[in-house]
Image (cartoon, rainbow, N blue to C red):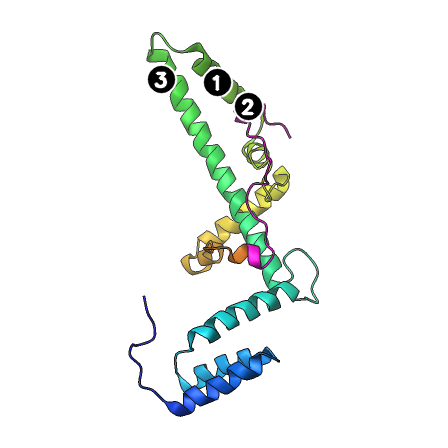
Amino acid sequence: MRYCREPQPVDRLHEEELERHRKSAVHNDIAVAAAMYYCAEEKICPPPWLVAASANLMIELLKKEKSKKRGRAAGRVARCRQDLFDFDRWNAVHQVRELKKKNKDELEILKTWGDVDQRHVTRIHKTQAWLLRHDTFECASMSLTGCDAKAGPEAVRASYRRVKRAMADKSVAYRYSLFTGNFLHRVGIDWGYRTGTKIVPFYDLTL
């Protein structure tokens, strides 16, 4: 997909102006922002060097952003990190609910089966006991063990409600879009499962 028409008419004045910005940016990276502003004002496509330089500049500025507000969602990067955590917790709740439905169906199927692998039967009953012993948000909290979004049941509940409210509006739901590539790592957001996390069955997880 290309947003700039090819080939574009050559405008020597624009080329000379952007080249001046490129040389200036070697010594003062604010020239990158000035060059991008110039392209926006003149409604011309930024050259590849400017796109790459702008991306790097924005990443550096995001990493160094300081907010006067307090809390984990004070700055842009912090808000993005919190949104990712909220979404992970919301998803964990849905996974637990799916597990409950699946476990219930498997228990019904066991009644009609004859010769069944006893290890499989044991797993189903252990999972049932685990699900009955804890409520949905406790189970979701435990399922996030080893994940950066790990939190207690009440925090999981709060995150679930935030995402549920946002999902009611399709336009707001886009705040939980996942970014491709290594962008999140570049801006300092660690997200996902920590390395070295030991995977254990649901029924062996504890609060």
Q: Residue at x 48, y 85 (%)?
A: 19
In which quadrant of the rendered image does the C terminus lie?
top right
* Pair 1/3: label in front: 1
Residues under labels 2 and 3: Cα distance?
A: 20 Å
What residue type is disc 3 on?
A: Ile
Q: Residue at x 44, y 53 (%)?
A: 168
The residue carrying mark 2 is 203
Q: Position of residue 1 (x, y in %)?
A: 32, 66
Q: Earlier in the sequence, mark 2 or mark 3?
A: 3
Tell me the SS state at disc 2: helix
Q: Which mark is residue 109?
A: 3
Q: Residue at x 58, y 23 (%)?
A: 204
The residue carrying mark 1 is 123
Q: Earlier in the sequence, mark 2 or mark 1?
A: 1
Q: Residues within 10 Å of mark 3 (few under 14, many from 20)?
A: few
What residue type is disc 1 on?
A: Arg
Q: Residues within 10 Å of mark 2 (few under 14, many from 20)?
A: some
- In the rendered image of this protein, does residue 65 appear above or below residue 202? below
Tell me the SS state at disc 3: helix
